[in-house]
Amino acid sequence: RPITNHLPTAELQALDAAHHMHPFTTNDKLAKKGARIITQAKGVWLKDSEGEEIIDGMAGLWCVNIGYAREEIAEAAARQIRELPYYNTFFQTSHVPAIALAARIAELAPGDLNHVFFAGSGSEANDTNIRLARHYWTLKEQPQRQVIIARKNGYHGSTMGGASLGGMVSMHEQGMLPIPGIVHIDQPYWYLEGGEMTPEDFGLARARALEDKILEIGPEKVAAFIAEPIQGAGGVIVPPASYWPEIQRIVDKYGILLIADEVITGFGRTGNWFGSQTFGIRPHIMTIAKGLSSGYAPIGGSIVCDEVAATIASDEFNHGYTYSGHPVAAAIALENLRIMEEEGVVEHVRDVAHPYLAERWHALGDHPLVGETSLVGLMGSLALTPVKGERVRFASEAGTAGFITRERCFANNVIMRHVYDRMIIAPPLVITPAEIDILMDRATKALDEAY
Ligand code: PLP
């Protein structure tokens, strides 16, 4: 019997449990409960195998920026598959989708970020960045500059390189990570770690942790610093305003490469094309993925500044992926960027985020379970608190309140993510005010039920 959407849910769940290993999941537990089977999606709405309609407050995994089921993308993909479904860019050949996409990204990216090395995902792109940064310094005749500084509770992917750059202890514990030459500094998480300091002072202190680490290692040994403009998977942790200017001063002072991981913040999420523009950051390298294709095809990349690209170009860079610049993925990404520009999606983010979503989001701060609300563009988080008015987390089994709230969201047909006791939204960027109302009504109901 063919396995299609027409099979009963229980049968699909049984097959899923029997053969499909889910990422970031305790598969035994999921098998008992049965996965929710998503069968269709349109705009900001998902449909499951029971016919339930779910509003997607997470744009899939922070990626479906233009919303689901866009016909133009289906056509662009079909056209490209008919014309040239695959060719590589390794051995003296190129093709139009990769050329056009690289040129378009260079146009959109700020400053002299004019060169793109394609990958299949954000993780792969960050692996590329490790090799790019280290090889760059070797070519600059400073081969001792190999250490990359990253942050605790940062997220940079799941490959050995990406997970090493990330500061997730639970990932490091599996597989002997981090790989050598990667060290982590504390995060700018004022709400839980700022103590009595003002956010401003705390932001400066946490930025200066970078300078302390550079001096401890020896500036001549440091290749790069990597960070997300806003930590996403770490809990949508928005740094105090003082943080990024001080980081920028420090990387400038010691001449180390700054890598902005824009996998989530890129392509409109924060109300500008890139989060670096929102925070006034001037990176040498940017990691991109997710919103580049709105998740319609797996594609990522590193956007590289003129100087680094010119240096790398002077030698053979022994690195690349079979799917670097994949023509179908590139054609999809190009069409996605065309739609974003034609429909003014980035401007739309600014229009609906402030004041519309912001007013409703920050009003949740009055809820007895909520200790803090943060929102930049269409990327928001709530810290759940056991003691209203105090900046504390749940003492035992961190994440319990978040887990319950997430389950209540699920039951109320709204997708929100939880990271320990932080609740997160990052809806498709095309969400309308009426859909924001539905999202917020359901989220509020879930919080009430969890309380
Ligand atoms: N970097 C950041 C900031 C991310 O949020 C993610 C994924 O969530 C990645 C890298 C990894 O991207 P991918 O899952 O496409 O490998």
Image (cartoon, rainbow, N blue to C red):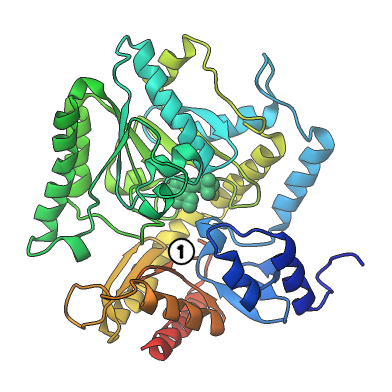
Residue 28, position in %: x, y?
60, 68
**Location of the N terminus (image quadrant):** bottom right
> Where 343 sits versus 363, above or below?
above
Residue at 11% of width from left, 64% of height from top?
195
Residue at 64% of width from left, 62% of height from top?
68
In this orientation, which residue lies closer to the viewer: 247 or 272? 247
- The answer to whether any part of residue 289 appears in the image is no
Which corner quadrant of the image does residue 309 belong to?
top left
Q: Which residue is mark 1?
A: 426
In this orientation, which residue lies closer to the viewer: 129 or 297? 129
Residue 376, position in %: x, y?
34, 60
Q: Secondary structure at mark 1?
A: loop
Residue 405 horizontal side relative to residue 66, left or right: left
In this orientation, which residue lies closer to the viewer: 204 or 123? 123
Residue 123 horizontal side relative to residue 45, left or right: left
Residue 438 horizontal side relative to residue 42, left or right: left
How many residues crowd around disc 1 within 10 Å: few (fewer than 14), some, or many (20 or more)?
many
**Location of the C terminus (image quadrant):** bottom left
Could you tell me the amino acid type at mark 1?
Answer: Ala
Residue 426, position in %: x, y?
46, 64
Disc tally is 1
Residue 40 horizontal side relative to residue 6, left or right: left
Residue at 35% of width from left, 29% of height from top?
284
Is the CB–ligand 1 distance for label 1 below 8 Å? no
Residue at 13% of width from left, 48% of height from top?
204
Which corner quadrant of the image does residue 320 belong to?
top right
